[in-house]
Image: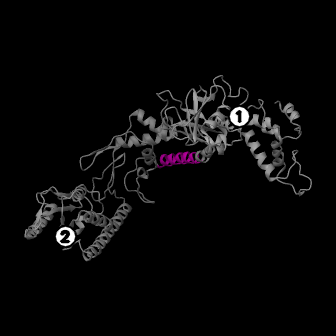
């Protein structure tokens, strides 16, 4: 009876590239031993495939090996019946990787054989033995890694450069005994120029632009494999790393420890420390900025006319006064102007006020900056319009009829505004409000086509709307009369502060006054302090006369 042919793929591996250029190397020796083993099994139908699966210079601790990937693909395609290796650790040194390889073999009905360790992966006992062996192989690999890490730490403590990309300003060591970096004087001048320039501009972003304008780039060098590396414009992250790198003080850093006098310094300590102080100041400013960004309710929802996100930023003027803006992505990355003519930066408060005013009018209920995110899904700012994608139910309440909701919203629109139910999601509507984006001194602000706010009189005042909201909340929690005094029979213990009780009186303003405030139609100059001061009449007609409605 003729035996079936067993197609054998020989896999070889060597961790380092050392010696691979020899006429007969380790890979050749492994293959020769495997071919001899396959030849001894000719009577069992074994035959060696002509394809070579050789990984020279690849670690057995990873599956990222080109020949191994090609071999596993051929197994899955049914081209290989058995893998033949010199030792199991040539195939892998990882127990997890071995389990993955066995799964591929099982699915394809294939197996593997070790020439010097006779195992059969088709039996449970063979798998058990292999797992034990691989556990020891993985243990050996981890112990070797620990030894290497300890050696690197000890070498760096002695000031030795342990390889890698040489930093700008230095060349690799020439003395194998000391392994100290060698100063590259032209590059060292560039490094000192970068440090001094940073103190001049006090901004990494500005420094990045200045270096690009001056043609100063990162270190260019050729690796041992002949590959060109570096010679590129500095990124912000690369500049931060350079400015904080203590290697320029002549130190070698390993984890949290710095070892001095390892090589010649190229930056004076006073200059280096001055840069660290300035970087620390910028870090504090960024922390303040991040803490203030919580005041930007449209963060993540607002986009420019090209669909690019406008992120909230904060700048600080004199006396520590802060200014919030929504800034387009190109400007955030250092562009001075958008070539497509789209807007670059808008005062965040004016955008927030505009949206609050529009939504308060459409929803006919008080809205606060916090509640914006429950209504707005997307906001697109154009030079001539603002497109707001909104939650329909938040504007119309429980009514779920699309056409009825659209009509209800249209009744609240001003001249020139439009509403459209979202074709992809009926729960959303898009409201378009015409605006003008005017610019002066590099700053932009929003206005309606006639140059006024949408109501033609006064802009929406979020403080007034917030006051109304607080007033109604206060009335529901305090037993108060419309004049702010306690209802007879209630506990005489004061409820809330006098200011809180004064705020509660806003809930008893005439309904049309409250509606006008929500819609932004209040008289110009009307402030919250005008409404909470004593002497506001209880009669609605007198309130209108006193407050100018």
Q: Is residue 168 left or right of residue 498?
A: left
Residue 433 on image: x %, y % = 61, 30
**Residue 179 in view (yes/no):** yes
Q: Would you call the spot at circle 1 few (<14 residues within 10 Å), some (14-19), or many (20 or more)? A: many
Q: Earlier in the sequence, mark 2 or mark 1?
A: 2
The residue sitting at 33% across, 53% down in the picture is 164
Picture coordinates of residue 121, whole percent (x, y): 23, 71
Tell me if 286 is positioned left or right of 137 in this view: right
Which of the pair 481/418 is nearer the observer?
A: 418
Q: Quadrant of the C terminus?
A: top right
Q: Position of residue 327 (x, y in %)?
A: 55, 36
Q: Quadrant of residue 257?
A: bottom left
**Label 2 secondary element:** strand
The quarter of the rendered structure image containing the N terminus is bottom left
Q: Secondary structure at mark 1?
A: loop
In this rendering, would 402 be left or right of 3? right
**Residue 26 visible in image:** no
> In the rendered image, which quarter is residue 366 located in?
top right
Residue 178, compared with residue 425, is above or below; it is: below
Q: Quadrant of residue 65?
A: bottom left
Which segment is the magenta one?
269-287
Kindly identify the residue that appears in the image at 71 percent across and 31 percent down: 459
Dominant secondary-structure state across the stretch colored magenta? helix
Q: Position of residue 144 (x, y in %)?
A: 31, 68
Question: Nearest the camera: 186 or 222?
Answer: 222
User: Can you identify the residue that label 2 sits on?
Assistant: 114
Q: What residue is pinned by disc 1? A: 460
On residue 530, the disc is none
Task: Name the side, left or right, on which 373 lies relative to 472.
Answer: left
Asked if residue 83 is positioned above or below residue 525 in the image, the reply reads below
Q: Is residue 283 located in the magenta-colored stretch of the structure? A: yes
Looking at the image, which is closer to me, 418 or 244? 418
């Amino acid at each position: 009876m003729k035996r079936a042919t067993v197609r054998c793929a020989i896999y070889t591996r060597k961790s380092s590239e050392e010696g691979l250029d020899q006429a007969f190397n380790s890979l050749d020796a492994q293959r020769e031993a495997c071919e001899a083993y396959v030849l001894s099994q000719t009577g069992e139908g074994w035959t060696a495939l002509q394809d070579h699966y050789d990984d020279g210079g690849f670690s057995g601790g990873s599956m990222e090996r080109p020949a191994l990937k090609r071999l596993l693909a051929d197994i899955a395609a049914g081209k290989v019946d058995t893998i033949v290796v010199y030792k199991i650790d040539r195939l892998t040194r990882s127990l997890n990787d071995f389990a993955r390889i066995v799964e591929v073999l099982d699915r394809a009905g294939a197996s593997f054989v070790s020439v010097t360790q006779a195992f059969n992966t088709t039996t449970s006992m063979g798998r058990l033995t292999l797992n034990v062996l691989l556990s020891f192989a993985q243990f050996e690999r981890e112990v070797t890694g620990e030894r290497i890490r300890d050696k690197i730490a000890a070498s760096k403590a002695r000031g030795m450069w342990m390889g890698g990309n040489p930093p700008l300003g230095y060349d690799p060591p020439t003395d194998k005994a000391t392994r100290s970096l060698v100063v590259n004087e032209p590059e060292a001048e560039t490094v000192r120029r970068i440090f001094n320039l940073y103190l001049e501009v006090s901004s990494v972003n500005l420094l990045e632009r200045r270096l690009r304008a001056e043609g100063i780039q990162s270190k260019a060098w050729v690796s041992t494999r002949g590959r060109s590396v570096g010679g590129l414009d500095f990124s912000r992250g690369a500049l931060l790393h350079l400015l904080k790198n203590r290697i320029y003080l002549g130190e070698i850093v390993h984890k949290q420890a710095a070892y001095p006098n390892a090589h010649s310094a190229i930056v004076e300590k006073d200059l280096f420390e001055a840069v660290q102080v300035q970087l620390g100041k910028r870090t504090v400013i960024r922390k303040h900025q991040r803490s203030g960004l919580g005041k930007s309710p449209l963060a993540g929802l607002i986009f420019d006319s090209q669909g690019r996100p406008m992120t909230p930023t904060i700048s600080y003027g004199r006396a520590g006064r802060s200014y919030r803006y929504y800034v387009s992505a190109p400007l955030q990355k250092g562009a001075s102007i958008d070539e497509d003519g789209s807007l670059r930066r808008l005062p965040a408060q004016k955008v927030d006020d505009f949206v609050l005013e529009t939504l308060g009018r459409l929803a006919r209920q008080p809205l606060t900056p916090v509640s914006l995110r429950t209504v707005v899904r997307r906001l697109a700012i154009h030079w001539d319009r603002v497109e707001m994608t909104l939650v329909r139910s938040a504007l119309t309440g429980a009514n779920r009829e699309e056409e009825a909701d659209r009509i209800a919203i249209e009744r609240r629109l001003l001249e020139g505004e439009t509403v459209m139910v979202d074709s992809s999601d009926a729960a959303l509507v898009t409201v378009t409000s015409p605006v003008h984006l005017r610019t002066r001194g590099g700053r932009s602000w929003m206005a309606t086509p006639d140059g006024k706010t949408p109501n033609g009189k006064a802009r929406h005042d979020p403080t007034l709307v917030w006051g109304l909201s607080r007033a109604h909340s206060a009335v529901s929690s305090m037993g108060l009369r419309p004049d702010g005094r306690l209802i007879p029979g209630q506990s005489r213990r004061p409820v809330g502060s006098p200011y809180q009780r004064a705020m509660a009186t806003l809930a008893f303003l005439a309904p049309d006054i409250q509606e006008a405030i929500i819609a932004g139609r209040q008289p110009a100059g009307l402030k919250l302090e005008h409404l909470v001061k004593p002497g506001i009449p209880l009669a609605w007609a007198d309130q209108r006369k006193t407050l100018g409605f």
